[in-house]
Image (cartoon, rainbow, N blue to C red):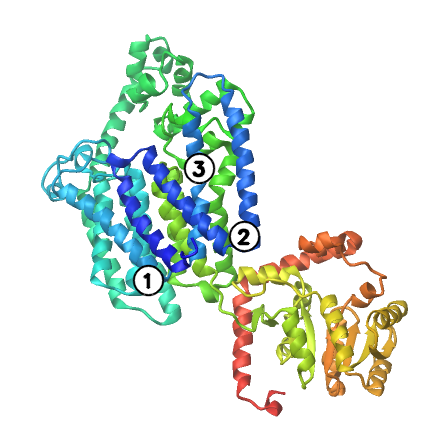
């Protein structure tokens, strides 16, 4: 393990990813192939977890797996006591949970490995080529399996155009096991391949993209065929919009999209899907006529044998009433089902869900909604072709949140991050990665058999892990902007060192949502904030904003802490301090407290905040301090500094400190450590001072500005800063 650096782990992961395609072949598709992949995925994760995880990441992951383990135990206890007779296997149920939890392992591993763009695209290109080429070859030579069974296809792609083909005999899935899984994988790959040709168009990736599109029509499912048009259409629109922004439109990319769309239209016209649609349209018309020939009341009085014939007219095929959920077992259900006044009774997926709902009702256990009735139990009835519905019935609300919620949470995070920084993330790559992963989940809701197998969990998690890694790559800068306000990204030690060693005047402003909303409409004030000052991130609202906009601020710098740091270093530098603001008792007790805590500190003057501004200014000038702390509350203290700073040219450090004097003098207690550690210091203040709850409206307004107007204000501020860079001091003023 010592010799396994990130580069070696990346290479191993890529090799295993390509080799795993072989395990999707029908001949190898069994629990053993699943276990092999689980073992390798787990080993790679453990190495990364031990060697490269931060303490915070370890805590989060351990917490997640503890919660998952607790849930699994409760689920197994609940599902073991089931009143309705069904086959149930504890080993298969446990294997399912292990398999489903692989998503977080893969996403995290790929995220930490930070695979390069070129390697990521190359891996997808190779994987897509292997899958699509094998499907096409087996179709041409009629040696693979049809999409709906394990028989050889009767017609190849060339025969589509001049023979009257049947979709059952013309569709092809190669030697793979499940059609829906391969459809899901390829729709992901097509999206990535479109990015690949934009990144660097070569013959190989263009050929692979073309083969992938063709193989999607060979699969013959609605998801595979319709997805081609949806992905190509969205990709073309996304490319044009983002390219207009950057003024870099490549005609070859647009031409590639158009050619593929035209080819797809031709293929669709003669594809197995068209044959399937025509077949089912005729079948449904025939069954509708048959249904109208007999009333429901008449049907209910028929014998079981005659009743079964009637069920066919409601699109209930023999597999259901003979094998999956026998009529003899529960005729009452089928009688009630065909009596429902809804067009959905013709939908097989609606029937599947209705049967499982019936089984749940017979068990009559409220815990089934929370913990589910068991994946293994449902599969022994039949496979519901709708992943999210399947998961709900299998593992309950909690299971869906813990297992599938990972995808949803990550997507929400990526969408929010994009919205909060459109200037940076309004790109073709980011837009397409967001779209194809979202679309993948939508397809899983529609078609099923996508999110319940390693075969499909692996590529989706791989792409999402890569997307997370590129979205969280940070280019370290000394500052970043929030609705136009320049804010330092340095930590408290770096800022203190620079301030105390600087020869020029340093004005330190605390940046938090409330202060920003007080000043953001005042252009002159924004300019004052953004001059060569230290604007420090004071509060977790700024930290959260930074994370959402891919910034570098990981920790806030509370004003009281920087205040104490400056006081500490002022002793060594023999700097004189002036305290201005707050009540008389607070400012006096602050003076006494500082003199007690820091031996040798020089406080040359202090005045409360209730004297006239003129008197305060004159006294500050008279005492000639090196450091001035102003505690008038915001926005009064900031306006005081901006107005009078030219009178304080000899003062080295000026800092507004808000309620710091009250905290230092112990007139107001700072939030207990537990609140600070949990980032809830703001909540403590609101509990102590209920009038602060009015600030929630301001905070909400701030978040709206960050979400919708952050890019506008930042661009405006940066432009103004750029224009000022070449000006001398006099010209800037």
Contact? badges 1 and 2 (CB < 8 Å): no
Numbered disc in front, either 1 or 2: 2
Image coords of residue 596 (percent x, y)? 86, 70
Image-quadrant location for residue 164 = top left
Q: Could you tell me how far apart the alpha carbons at marks 3 and 1 are, in whole angstroms?
A: 31 Å
For the point 57% across and 70% down, the residue is 481
Contact? badges 3 and 1 (CB < 8 Å): no
Camera-nearest residue between 311 and 157? 157
Q: What element carries label 3?
A: helix
Q: Which mark is residue 57?
A: 2
**Residue located beneath label 3 in the image:** 98
Image-quadrant location for residue 707 = bottom right
In the rendered image, is residue 223 in sight? no
Q: Vertically, is 46 above or below 350?
A: below
Q: Which mark is residue 118?
A: 1
Q: Vertically, is 219 above or below 265?
A: above
């Amino acid at each position: 393990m010592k010799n396994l650096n990130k580069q070696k782990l990346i290479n191993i992961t890529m090799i295993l990813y390509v080799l795993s395609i072989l395990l999707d072949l029908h001949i190898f598709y069994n629990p053993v192939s699943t276990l092999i992949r689980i073992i390798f995925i787990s080993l790679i994760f453990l190495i990364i977890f031990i060697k490269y995880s931060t303490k915070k990441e370890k805590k989060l992951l351990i917490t997640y797996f503890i919660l998952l383990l607790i849930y699994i135990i409760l689920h197994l206890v609940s599902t073991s006591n089931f009143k309705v007779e069904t086959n149930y296997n504890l080993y298969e149920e446990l294997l399912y949970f292990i398999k489903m939890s692989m998503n977080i392992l893969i996403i995290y591993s790929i995220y930490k490995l930070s695979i390069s763009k070129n390697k990521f695209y190359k891996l997808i290109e190779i994987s897509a080529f292997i899958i699509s080429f094998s499907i096409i070859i087996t179709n041409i030579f009629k040696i693979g399996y049809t999409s709906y069974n394990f028989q050889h296809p009767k017609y190849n792609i060339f025969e589509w155009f001049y023979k009257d083909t049947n979709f059952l005999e013309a569709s092809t899935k190669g030697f793979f096991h499940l059609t829906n899984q391969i459809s899901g994988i390829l729709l992901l790959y097509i999206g990535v391949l479109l990015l690949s040709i934009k990144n660097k168009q070569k013959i190989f990736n263009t050929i692979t993209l073309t083969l992938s599109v063709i193989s999607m029509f060979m699969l013959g499912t609605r998801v595979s065929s319709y997805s081609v048009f949806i992905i190509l259409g969205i990709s073309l629109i996304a490319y044009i919009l983002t390219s207009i922004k950057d003024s870099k439109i490549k005609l070859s990319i647009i031409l590639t999209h158009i050619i593929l769309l035209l080819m797809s239209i031709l293929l669709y016209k003669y594809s197995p899907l068209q044959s399937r649609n025509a077949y089912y349209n005729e079948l449904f018309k025939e069954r509708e006529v048959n249904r109208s020939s007999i009333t429901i009341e008449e049907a209910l009085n028929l014998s079981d044998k005659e009743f079964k014939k009637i069920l066919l007219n409601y699109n209930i095929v023999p597999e259901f009433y003979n094998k999956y959920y026998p009529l003899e077992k529960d005729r009452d259900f089928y009688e009630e089902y065909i009596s429902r006044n809804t067009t959905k009774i013709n939908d097989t997926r609606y029937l599947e869900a209705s049967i499982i709902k019936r089984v749940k009702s017979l068990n009559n256990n409220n815990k089934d909604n929370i913990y589910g009735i068991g994946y293994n139990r449902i599969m022994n009835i039949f496979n519901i072709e709708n992943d999210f519905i399947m998961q709900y019935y299998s593992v309950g609300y909690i299971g869906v949140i813990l297992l599938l919620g990972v995808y949803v949470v990550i997507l929400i995070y990526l969408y929010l991050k994009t919205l909060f920084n459109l200037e940076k993330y309004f790109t073709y790559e980011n837009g397409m990665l967001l779209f194809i992963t979202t679309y993948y989940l939508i397809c899983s809701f529609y078609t099923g058999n996508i999110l319940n197998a390693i075969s499909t969990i692996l590529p989706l998690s791989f792409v999402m892990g890569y997307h997370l890694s590129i979205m969280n790559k940070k280019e370290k800068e000394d500052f970043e902007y929030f609705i136009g306000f320049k804010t330092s990204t340095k930590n408290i030690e770096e800022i203190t060192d620079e301030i105390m060693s600087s020869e020029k005047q340093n004005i330190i402003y605390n940046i938090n949502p409330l202060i920003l909303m007080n000043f953001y409409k005042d252009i002159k004030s924004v300019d004052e904030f953004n001059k060569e000052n230290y604007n420090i991130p004071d509060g977790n609202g700024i930290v959260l904003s930074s994370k959402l906009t891919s910034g570098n601020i990981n920790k806030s710098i509370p004003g009281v802490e920087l205040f104490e740091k400056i006081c500490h270093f002022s002793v060594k530098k023999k700097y004189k301090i002036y305290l201005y603001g707050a009540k008389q008792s607070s400012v006096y007790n602050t003076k006494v407290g500082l003199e007690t805590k820091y031996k040798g500190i020089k406080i040359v003057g202090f005045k409360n905040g209730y004297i006239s501004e003129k008197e305060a200014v004159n006294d500050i000038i008279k005492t000639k301090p090196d450091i001035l702390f102003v505690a008038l509350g915001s926005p009064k203290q900031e306006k005081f500094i901006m107005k009078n700073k030219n009178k304080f040219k000899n003062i080295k450090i000026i800092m507004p400190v808000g309620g710091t004097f009250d905290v230092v003098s112990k007139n107001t207690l700072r939030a207990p450590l537990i609140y600070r550690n949990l980032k809830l210091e703001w909540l403590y203040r609101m509990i102590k001072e209920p009038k602060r709850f009015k600030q929630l409206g301001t905070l909400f307004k701030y978040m709206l500005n960050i979400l919708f107007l952050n890019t506008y204000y930042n661009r405006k501020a940066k432009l103004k800063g750029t224009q000022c860079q070449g000006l001398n001091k006099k010209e800037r003023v």
